[in-house]
Image: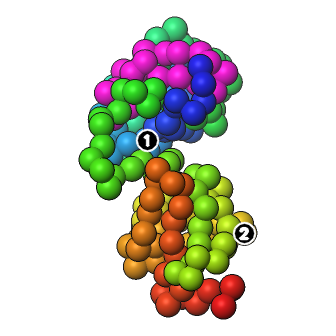
Amino acid sequence: MNKDNLIVIGVITGKHGIKGLLKIKWYTETSKGLELYSPVHLKNGNEFNLRIMFENKGQAICELEGISNPEDVELLKGQELYAKRSDFPNLNNNEYYQIDLVGCKVENTENAYIGEVTAVYDFGAGPLIEIGEELVIFNNDNFPIVNIKEKIIIRNSESFGDKND
């Protein structure tokens, strides 16, 4: 399966109990999003039907079809779970998924090239984008123009200064 057609929706963080249940940190709006996009895919192409059993300490405790012992779960620890992009809702004109920002060229308001978005992180306080070695809070004040079709983002130099000034 083409990785460009997949979106990360969670990561396996460990095992829960002795029956092969997994702890999963979800990146969807709620844990229910994991089940919504089932079957889920692993990087190696394996596909699993996923069922949420319950939540515990901010993680979804899930069952993956075909995984029934803690040893198999340990082998999957750290693996990201992917969903098909085609399973996601269609977006309106000015909407995009955070993954769409990766690969965008970043310019300042004078059209000077700053860098390229190499990653998007969200640790709970709002998304951060990585431009070279810099992590920048991704919001409308810092990035007033986002053109996903052209893969260009304009960074507001006045928000926090600009290395290219």
* Front one among 143 and 110: 110
Inspect the magenta stretch and tell me whether residue 41 lies in it: yes
| Amino acid under disc 2 | Glu
Q: Is residue 27 above or below residue 112?
A: above
Q: Is residue 154 left or right of residue 32?
A: right
Q: Mark 2 = which residue?
A: 133
Outermost residue to the top: 66
* Marks 2 and 1 in Cβ contact (< 8 Å): no
For disc 1, the marked residue is 26
Q: Secondary structure at mark 1?
A: strand
Q: Residues within 10 Å of mark 1 (few under 14, many from 20)?
A: many
Picture quadrant of residue 60: top left
- The percent position of residue 34, horizontal first and vertical second, equals 38, 31
Query: Magenta includes 36?
Result: yes
Q: Residue at x 52, y 81 (%)?
A: 109
The three-letter amino acid code for the residue at tag 1 is Trp
Q: Residues within 10 Å of mark 2 (few under 14, many from 20)?
A: few
Q: Which mark is residue 134?
A: none
Identify whether 122 is placed above or below 72.
Answer: below
Separation (CA) of disc 2 from disc 1:
26 Å
Which label sits in the foreground, 2 or 1? 2
Query: Which residue is situated farthest in the left direction here?
Result: 92
Q: Quadrant of residue 26?
A: top left
Boundaries of the magenta span: 33-52
